[in-house]
Image (cartoon, grey):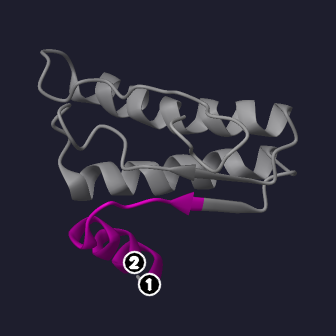
Amino acid sequence: GFGLPAKYVIHTAAPVWTNPGPEGEKVAGLAHCYMKSIALAAAQSFTSMAFPCLGTGNYGWPRGFACGIAIAACEQALPQASSLTRVIFCCFTESDASLYRAAFEG
């Protein structure tokens, strides 16, 4: 983790948006990344976790679209993850952060 101030890292890789294939499968794959990570964290009784904007870099996901999928997937998975009391969307740019802020305010 290169000095990351966390005890554990759950690694997940988003599907590549620009690869050929049905959009629905890609959306389900991205949602699965978030949901499976939450399930793994809950299985270890983690109380918090953080996600970057999965897939929005080299994998080409449109940022606003990926943001909506991330939030919806987490909302779907969190009721089964009673130990998790905090999920952070760790945005590396202000433009990404503004997408998440707007989604939570709306």
Residue 55, numbered label: none
Instruction: In the rendered view, tell whether residue 86 sits above or below residue 73.
Output: below
- The amino acid beneath tag 2 is Arg
Label 2 CA crowd tier, 10 Å (few <14, some 14–19, many 20+): few
- The residue lying at 44 percent from left, 84 percent from top is 105
Image quarter of residue 80? top right
Badge 1 element: helix
Please give the range of residues in magenta: 88-105
Q: Could you tell me residue 31's position as x and y percent? A: 46, 37
Q: Secondary structure at mark 2?
A: helix
Mark 1 burial class by Cα count in 10 Å: few <14, some 14-19, many 20+? few
Residue at image location 30% in from the left, 76% down from the top: 98
Left or right: where 63 falls relative to 8: left
Measured as percent of width and height from the top left, residue 92 is found at 32, 60
Locate residue 71, reporting x and y percent. Answer: 48, 57
Name the residue at the bottom extreme.
105
Which residue is the site of mark 1?
A: 105
Q: Is residue 54 above or below residue 86?
A: above
**Residue under pointer 2:** 101
State yes or no: residue 97 in magenta: yes
